[in-house]
Amino acid sequence: MDNLLTALRDSKVPNNSSSLLKSKNNFKGEFLFNSWHMMSSAGSDHENEYSPNHFPEHKSIRNGKNFMSYLNNQSLSQIPQELNMKEISELHQQAEKDLKAGRIETALEKFYVCIDQAFVAANRNPSDPEFSAYFVETLKFLNENALYFLKEDKIGVSLRILEISNEITGAKKYGVFPSIQSLTYNNLACCYRRMGKLEVALKYLERALGSLANTDERENAGITHINLCAIYSQMGK
């Protein structure tokens, strides 16, 4: 398996830091704590063009259909059944551009195809180090951009990205990644806290702790405990 991460890092995708956050090579989950305390506890109308209950593309997915199952059953005619590393890299770059342009569903579809095709290229071995590294960096990238949209008060967009990230990570098809799972749960909690749904936020933080059980992820567990304390305080407990 060729070095996909090297190909992506050498790509010529424009880097506009004021528009989208780029993924960091050194992931320790530190922005979880920062993002939590940067978020206002006040509610938001979040009734914009991409609110939590309004997704213009593929509404059937929002009506109970599993995102991954939906895509696996579609004939994405523009995408070959099997991609080589160069093609995966190019599709990944297209997905980043789509995300930057606000084509959220299109971007998420392409990211999923990239992950799945990289998995096929790794002989469907979730322990393949190259695939694992690509999976982790892609999910980190999606989480970081979800936080960016949340800070821009586009809660629906943020929630959608995190929901799909959670579905991809939680399926366990591609391996078990406690740090990424915990990261996604914490960020989902951030979204629901902004929406004033503290009980839902609390459940996601509890899931974050559960995903770190039997691991030595002390830093992420500590961050989750801090976020739990913030929720309990806000709830008057």
Image (cartoon, rainbow, N blue to C red):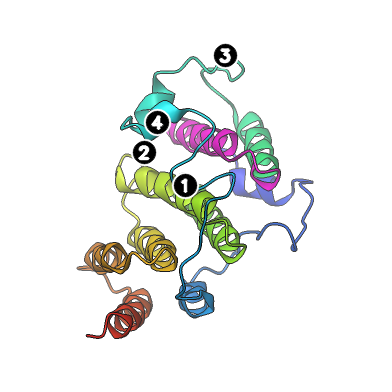
Residue underneath mark 3: 77
Where is mark 1, residue-wise?
160
Q: Earlier in the sequence, mark 2 or mark 1?
A: 2
- Of discs 3 and 2, which sits in the foreground? 3
Q: Is residue 179 above or below residue 139?
A: below
Q: Is residue 128 visible?
A: no
Residue kind at label 1, given as amino acid type? Arg
What label sits on residue 217 in the rendered view?
Answer: none
Circles 3 and 2: CB atoms closer than 8 Å: no
- The foreground one among 82 and 229 is 229
For image coordinates 43% across by 43% down, the residue present is 53
Residue 193 visible? The answer is: yes
Amino acid marked by disc 4: Ile
Q: Which stretch is magenta?
A: 99-123
Query: Mark 2 — residue?
Result: 125
Q: Nearer the viewer, mark 2 or mark 1?
A: 1
The correct choice, above or below, for 14 with respect to 105 in the image is: below
Residue 88 in picture, x, y percent from top left:
60, 33
